[in-house]
Image (tube, helix red, strand yellow):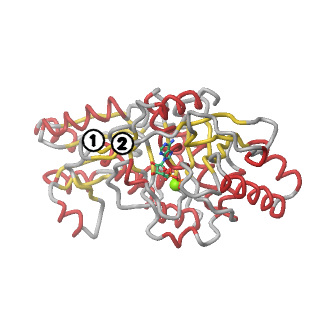
Amino acid sequence: MGKLNLVIIDRDIDYVNCVSDYLISEQAQNFFVSTYTEESAIAEFIAAETEMITDGIFLVCREFYEQVLQKEKGFVILLADEVSIVKQKDEGRAIYKYQYGNRLVAEILKIFAEEGALGNTFNNGFARKAKGKKHKIIGVYSPIGGVGKTTIAVGACIQSAWEGKNVFYLNLENIATTPLYFQGKQEESLSNILYYLKCNSPNLCLQIEGAKCVDPLYNIHFFQPPDSSYDFTEDVSQELCCLLQELRKSRQYDLIFIDFSSAINKNNLAVLRNCDDLLLVAEENFTSVVKIKCLLKELHLLLSREEETELRERFNLVLNKTLHAVVDNGEELNITINQKGVLSRIPLVENLTIFQDGVFKLDLNSSFGKAIYQLLLNF
Ligand SMILES: Nc1ncnc2c1ncn2[C@@H]1O[C@H](COP(=O)(O)OP(=O)(O)O)[C@@H](O)[C@H]1O
Ligand SMILES: [Mg+2]
């Protein structure tokens, strides 16, 4: 079983049509939707002697809530027409009625997750999505700060989303730049997710669904940055690996891009080892040469020989901010990680980030965008 019966009971026809249109077009894989808007039909439904569906969700307006609650064996949620009602309600379940469809669904899933109800149903449902597609985790790493990890990761996300792929952007920077590129209204952040992971919550899948943001422009999924950068100073390597497993298991995403911090620590090493492919970003300058050498030395110290070889082999060298004219810097500027050589050279582009329609956008209609497009053809 993967789909749930969702019954909406409300006399406001326009509202109900609007919500059910959204559910049918965007959430058809998760819900069977039925609606009751006419007073007589609602009365008949409530009075019916037949056993009501026990694994259904009932979204019910204030007028009929108590009646349905008394009768119902399923999961009854009040569709509150005022935010204050949701806040004041200390018994039963309530969600604010007037919000975007994806938020409404996220709130329903959150309630499920908190009450531990029907977890497996949803787990199975989400796991069945997008069967047969490739699901890849691509990490964008460099020990060098300001080299372009975030810009490349974000550009790769946007390009992939434009190509129709389902994309998740996971930011692991100490101070995240996520709000610069992606918009999302969500109170929960990666800190909440790390907490759920620590508690070994059985409803992780639902909690992730409920906590994620969906950027309205690109349809890219992501989490709000952690409440404090201190969250990453702890050892959360196990939690992060578990999160990757969950995201992978959900089979919702064709591509998951990880935007790393420059640190070489337990968290980053564990996540790096869980990526399918890795982009190692450098510039053609001496800082890069020194820092990459340092990285390789650290890998040698921290990992077993097999782990070290395996990780080094998975790196794909990407040179960012390259100049058109090839500058002969001599032998010393050779950066060698493995036999693969340089996978991609991304040119230096002026005014890469533009402010348009009230938000910052990466100008992918540039030689940077073309290089990202070419780069992605390798995966
Ligand atoms: N190819 C490029 N051309 C021009 N500017 C770039 C390029 N790549 C990155 N930048 C700029 O470099 C700065 C640092 O990039 P960022 O992605 O934040 O680095 P990191 O994540 O590695 O710290 C940003 O201002 C970004 O716009
Ligand atoms: Mg960054």
| Residue at point 64%, 40% (across, down) | 318
- Give me the C-alpha separation between circle 1 and circle 2: 7 Å
The quarter of the displayed image where residue 240 is located: bottom right
Instruction: Return the x and y of residue 249 as percentages of the image width and height.
Output: 60, 43
Question: x, y (%) of residue 308?
Answer: 82, 52
Q: Is residue 236 left or right of residue 229?
A: right
- Residue 296 location in percent, x, y? 78, 55
Question: What is the three-letter code of the residue carrying label 1?
Answer: Gln
> Residue 63 or 155: which is nearer the viewer?
155
Mark 2 secondary-structure assignment: strand
**Residues packed near mark 2 inside 10 Å, few (<14), some (14 to 19) or many (20 plus):** some
Q: Is residue 176 left or right of residue 346?
A: left
Identify whether 11 is placed above or below 288: above
> Which of the numbered marks, if any, corresponds to residue 361?
2
The residue labelled by disc 1 is: 356
Q: Earlier in the sequence, mark 1 or mark 2?
A: 1
Q: Nearer the viewer, residue 333 or 237?
A: 333
